[in-house]
Image (cartoon, rainbow, N blue to C red):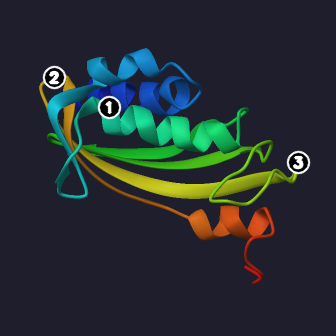
Amino acid sequence: MSTETRKAIARRWFEEGWAGRLELAPEIFAPHFTSGGKPAGPEKSRQNVLAYRAGFPDLKAVVDRQVAEGDWVTTSFTAQGTHLNAFYGVPATGKPVKGSGVAVWRFEGDQVVESWAVFDDLAVLRDIGALSFSR
């Protein structure tokens, strides 16, 4: 499988999966998928999206850039939405939020088997007023 095909699969999850197409999780993530070195399976990715979309129902992720080499794809992305329901215990504020992240995925064939990712949750918490600090 080409690196361009792997990049397209990753892009599909960020643009479609994070938009709510959770039925894609078992197609994109292998049953033995790990996240941060821990067993996760496709369900963990599905649950992650559900948790964020619960607080930000209009959540959208945009792929900013991708780099691929061999079985690895790195995706830099920006997520934004409106805080319409409680998130991390913070009641809805109606405020727009924006955060960035990077995901490094390893593929076996056409499925993701390993993920190492970071997301700027602090920016999101600051945007909804849970933290006070400036960028």
The residue lying toward the viewer, choosing from 57 and 62, is 57
Sequence-wise, which precedes: disc 2 or disc 1?
2
Marks 1 and 3 in Cβ contact (< 8 Å): no
Helix or strand or loop: what does disc 3 sit on?
A: loop
| Residue located at (64% from left, 38% from top) | 54
Task: Quarter of the image for the N terminus: give it.
Answer: top left
Pick the front one: 87 or 5:
87
Residue 101 vertical position relative to residue 14 in the rendered view, above or below: below
Q: Amino acid at mark 1?
A: Glu
Could you say where residue 91 lies in the image, as x and y percent from the top left?
79, 55
Q: How many marks?
A: 3
Give the residue number, with chain letter if any, for mark 3.
Answer: 94
Q: Which residue is mark 1?
A: 43
The residues tagged by marks 1 and 3 sit, at their Cα atoms, a distance apart of: 29 Å
Q: Looking at the image, which is closer to me, 101 or 97?
A: 97
Q: Which residue is mark 2?
A: 1
Single out the mark in the foreground, 2 or 3.
Answer: 3
Q: Quadrant of residue 52?
A: top right
Query: Residue 86 placed where, x, y %?
Result: 72, 50
Find residue 101 and report its horizontal and vertical position in percent. 50, 56
